[in-house]
Amino acid sequence: MKTVAEVLTQARSAGVDRLDAQLLLCHVLGRSRSWLLANDDVALDATQQQHLSPLIARRASGEPLAYLVGEKEFHGLTLQVSPAVLVPRPDTETLVDWALELLRDTSHPHVLDMGTGSGAIALALKHTCPHARVSALDASDEALAVARANAERLQLDIQLLQSDWWQGVAGQRFDMIVSNPPYIAEGDAHLAALQHEPLQALTSGTNGLDAMHEIIAGARQHLNAGAWLLLEHGHDQAPAVARLLAAAGFSEITTRPDLSGTPRCTGGRRV
Ligand code: GLN
C-alpha cells in the first residue's frame, strides 16, 4: 500500500499540483491538511486507494478540484458545487465586497442576483448583510437545486426563482441588482481550460456581451431610483460595459479591479 508521501510524488508525476493532491487526500482520508503534513508516512488502505486514484486521474485531466471534492470556499462560506454550476472564483468576491459597501448604509434593501449558479453571490450577501432581502434567479433548474441546497445547509434565507434573465421578475423593482453573467466570447481559446464547467454559465454570443446587453437593457425598469447595478465582466470588457451603462442612462459609472488588479466589475446608478 502506498503512503501519503508516495501518493504525493506519484500525483506530481501525473501533473497534479501538490496542494490539489493534498486536498484530494484530505477528502478521501477525512483528515485535515495539518494532519496530512504530520503523517506522510501513513499508508492508505485499499478502499482509500481505490477512491483516490480516479480522483487524481480526473484532476490530471483538468477537472476542477471543486467538482472532485464537491465544495468550494467563497467569501468565508463553504459552498457545495457540482458540474451544473460554475465554480465560484475569488475574482467574484470583488463584486460581493463592492455590493456590501453600498448596502452598508441602507435599511432593508431588496437585492437581486441574476444568474446565481451555486448561489455564491446571493448567499455571501445574505450572510454578511442579514438585513437585506435577497432574491436570486437562474435559468437552470439544476443550478437552482444546488443553490437551494446551499441556502438550506447554511441556513440563509434567500428567495430562489427560475427565470431566463428578466422574464421571471416582470413588474418587480429592486434596491440593487448584481450579476456575474456569462461573458466569454463563443470560440474563445480560454474555453478549452473551462471545458468541465457549464457552457451556459460561461459564453454569451460572439463577443461575450449578449447577456450584458440584456441585463443592462432591462435594468432601469427593475431598479428603484438611486439603486445600483453591479456587473462582473471579462478582463477587457470594462469600457464596453461602461458604454452600455452610459447608453442606458446610468450615472456614477465606476470600474473596480479584482485581487490581481484586472478591471473586473463595472457598475452604475439609476438616476
Ligand atoms: N471568470 C470566469 C473565467 O474566465 C468566467 C466567468 C463568467 O463567464 N462569468 O474563468
Image (cartoon, helix red, strand yellow):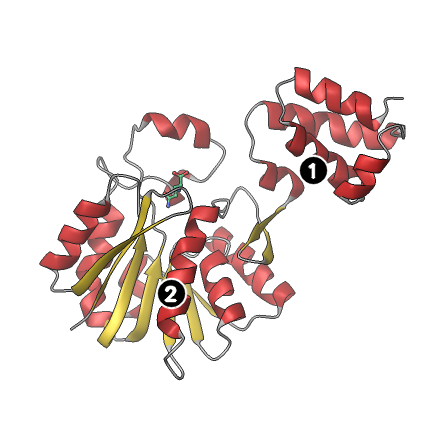
**Three-letter amino acid code at the position of disc 1:** Leu
* Observer-nearest of 55 and 251: 251
Q: Quadrant of residue 202?
A: top left
| Element at label 2 | helix
Which residue is most to the front? 261
Placement of the N terminus among the 4 image quadrants: top right
**Three-letter amino acid code at the position of disc 2:** Ala
Residue ID at (70%, 26%): 54
Say which mark, if any, is on residue 99: 2
Identify the mark nearer the N-term, 1 or 2: 1
Tally of numbered discs: 2
Q: Using residue 141 as the reference point, say whether residue 19 is left or right of it.
A: right
Is residue 263 at least partly visible in the picture? yes
Q: Quadrant of ligand 1?
A: top left
Q: Quadrant of residue 102?
A: bottom left
Residue position for label 1:
23
Residue ID at (65%, 17%): 14
Above or below 249: residue 242: above
Q: Position of residue 167 (x, y in %)?
A: 28, 63
The Cα atoms of the two marked residues, 1 and 2, are separated by 31 Å
| Element at label 1 | helix
Above or below 241: residue 68: above
Residue ID at (69%, 30%): 21
Determine crowd level at label 2: few under 14, some 14-19, many 20+ residues with C-alpha closer than 10 A.
Answer: many
Q: Position of residue 216 (x, y in %)?
A: 21, 58
Determine crowd level at label 1: few under 14, some 14-19, many 20+ residues with C-alpha closer than 10 A.
Answer: many
* Observer-nearest of 110 and 172: 110
Is residue 162 at least partly visible in the picture? no
Q: Position of residue 89 (x, y in %)?
A: 47, 46
Q: Using residue 6 as the reference point, say whether residue 125 is left or right of it.
A: left
